[in-house]
Image (cartoon, helix red, strand yellow):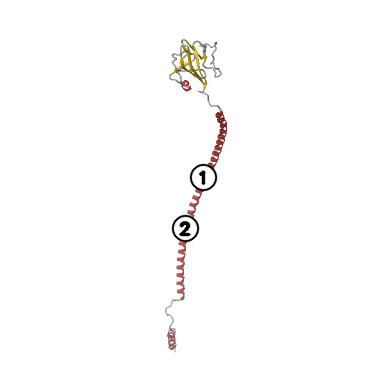
Amino acid sequence: MRFQREATVTHSSHGQAGARPNEHPHSPHPQHARRSRTKLASALLGVVLAVLAVVAGGAIYQMRETNLQLSEANQVAAAASSTIQTLQSGQAQDAVAAQSASSVISSLQAANQSMSSQLVPAEQASTSLPPSKAGSIYHQAQVTLDVGQDPIDITAPPSDATWGADASYGPDQRNALSYSARGLRINASHIGVPGAAADYRTCSSRTDYGGYGYVDTMTPTIVFCVRFSDRFGAVKVLNSTTGTLTLEVTTWEG
């Protein structure tokens, strides 16, 4: 009886094995499967964490670089701002200097206009004055002297047609012009000028005037420049004879 039960059990075991042909007799135990999945999850988590660590490190590095660049940019901006302030200050100083220069220029222009307004009347006054009479004829006439007659005054005014002829006016008087047997006497500083004509420019430019007294020659057409205290004159011999002497006497404005 005992023997048969064991045989039955054994048969029953074989019968069960034969009864489930789709089951895998060597499948892993469920606990081992869970452990494998846990290890795989742990490995994946480690990889993910490692990637995240790399990414985080890169981000941190990038942030540091960005902060460094921002710091440098801020320094450059600060330097630029300082430069701009310096330039603005310089421009303000230049503007003040320009305004001061403009004020000075305006003052100078006003002074110039004032001086110009003062000069215009002076110029008008100068142009309104009559031109200089120097060199214009003061008195001129043809005079005939007889031997021994009363002398004439070469400086006589134009209103005196006799040229100052007077018995009281002797040949020794200053600026006297007389004719005697000795010849023509010019009692003023004089000099003979070669040529038939003499003008104001010639007589006023001469510096070699001589003394008083009789002239060396009375050749017709000879001219004697005469210098007075305030003007110049000329005596031109036109004709001479034993008894008479014809002269052209001219004096000019001084």
The front one of 149 and 123 is: 149
Task: Please report contact status of discs 1 and 2: CB closer than 8 Å, yes or no.
Answer: no
How would you rate the neighbour count of disc 1 (Cα within 10 Å): few for under 14, some for 14-19, many for 20 or more? few
Residue 33 location, quadrant: bottom left
Q: Position of residue 219 (x, y in %)?
A: 43, 15
The front one of 143 and 71 is: 143
Of badges 1 and 2, nearer the viewer stands: 1
Q: In the rendered image, is residue 253 in sight? A: no
Quadrant holding the N terminus:
bottom left
Q: Position of residue 91 (x, y in %)?
A: 52, 43
- In the image, what residue occupies the spot 48% across and 54% down? 69
- Secondary structure at numbered mark 1: helix
The front one of 191 and 125 is: 191
Q: In the rendered image, is residue 69 in sight? A: yes
Rendered image: mark on residue 62:
2
Q: Position of residue 164 (x, y in %)?
A: 54, 15
Rendered image: mark on residue 87:
1
- Left or right, 167 with respect to 219, comes to right
Q: Earlier in the sequence, mark 1 or mark 2?
A: 2
Query: Which amino acid does the dot numbered 1 rest on?
Result: Leu
- In the image, what residue occupies the spot 49% across and 52% down? 73
Residue 221, compared with residue 128, is above or below; it is above
